[in-house]
Amino acid sequence: MATPTHSRRTFLKTSLSAAAAVGFPTIVPSSVLGQNAPSNRINIGAIGVGRISRVHDMPGVWKYTTGARNNRIIAVCDLYAPRVEQGKQVLNGVYSKQTGKDYNATIGYSDYRELLSNKEIDAVIISTPDHQHARLAVAAVRANKDVYLQKPASLTISEGRFMSDHVMSSGQILQIGSQQRSWKQFYRACELVRNGRIGDIKHVEIGLPGDPSGGNPDKMPIPAGFNYDAWLGSTPEVYYTVDRVMPQQGFDRPGWLRMEQFGAGMITGWGAHHVDTAHWGMNTEHTGPVEVWGTAEFPTHGLWNVHGPFKTDSVYANGITMSISGDYPNGIKWIGTEGWIFVTRDEQASPTATAADKANVDPLVASDPKILTSVIGPNEVQLYTSDDQHGNWLDCIRSRHAPTATAELGHRACSTCLVNHIAMKTKRKLHWDPAKERFNNDDEANSMLSRPQRAPYILS
């Protein structure tokens, strides 16, 4: 006999499919089973329980204990055994406090495939290093799980296209962690830009820092309880050293963020956020630039090898130009024929610091303050509204509506960042076809759209 939770999941899938077939709203009302009943709860597994999971992704979900967003993270998975235990302890403590009872039910896994095979899990949060994102997302939707995927969407453009296509064909809900779409000032900035409050957009400036050189390259023994081969995944086999991976103790900024083997550095790290926001305001969310060029400084010593100071320029088919550089204030500035708007985060942090120094900044400014108080009429462009990125994901798991940051939108933001990164590496003007997702007449640049993948971790 099926368990109550399994029965609930079968009931929901059947009810949602039937409702969609006849055009009824695909939301099961709380009166059916009781909105806060355990049998009506979304059960979630967390894959990767390091820094971003502990401070952002899991807290972003576990705060919802009632109503339509009612959920519980019932399992954690990590390739480093101590982090599995730490993740269990954190969740057991959270749920003990929430329920007022001793809670010790969080399940721990060392293999994501075992977590995905758990039929009680409805959805997963993927908070792993960048090079694992696309493969794990594809595995999750194939297992009929909905997904919250940390940005950037993929390590390469070809992986991102593969992932987005599979998500779209699966019918599963995937939300990219582009949380600026759910922050009021970014929404407001894009709303004003899209409705012509600064006239026709001519140019966009995006401020992004680079990363420092450094890192200890000395070979070290692999820590006990760490599946380093699986952690390397599809990337080449290289010796272990802590500055290539993540701290063995604590949750400071990990070294893999500064290794090209596992990502492209800040151009995708923060760039995936800012480019996505820029595209939202430009109404170019499903495309990319057609020309791009740039330069960057890359380290000549030490272990870390992602870009440092850089500047890239690009042109879109609609004539809008974009420049990305650390010489600009961190954020996005749209410049139009009738003024400009600049938006950034409320607290501006130094992402390259191990202990981030934060300072309050004015998150939304314009060439004329009156622009910011303009009222958007009912017949003007109305953007997708979300009050919280994780909350919107939970809403969409219930409703089966598209979330604010779909796999395709995440892929397009990431691919644009990677096109800029390829321009940094080639040091020449490139001509990009955003429909075909290839460079025109440039074999060297096209060779960078994918990377060789190491068995048995091949995305297929």
Image: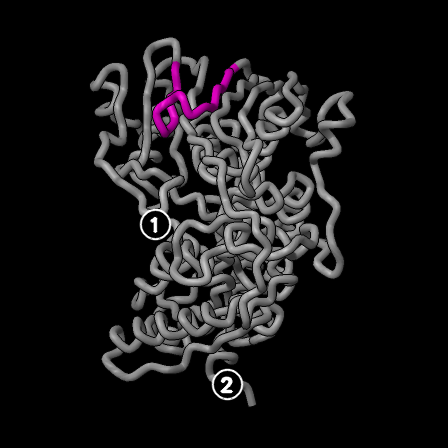
- Location of residue 391 with respect to 7 vertically, above or below: above
Q: Is residue 171 among the parts visible in the rendering?
A: no
Q: Is residue 47 left or right of residue 196?
A: right
**Could you tell me which residue is drawn at 21 percent across and 18 percent down?**
370
Reading the chain from its start, which is encountered first: label 1 or label 2? Answer: 2
Disc 2 crowd, CA 10 A, few/some/many (<14, 14-19, 20+): few
Q: Can you say which quadrant of the picture contains the C terminus?
A: bottom right
Which residue is rendered at x = 56% and y = 67% of the image? 226
Report if residue 325 lies within the magenta region: yes
Disc on res. 205: none
Q: Residue at x 49, y 40 (%)?
A: 214
- Residue 269 percent location from the top left of the image: 48, 40
Q: Nearer the viewer, residue 163 or 422?
A: 422
Determine contact: label 1, label 2, CB under 8 Å.
no
Residue under label 2: 3
* Residue nearer the viewer, 313 or 191: 313
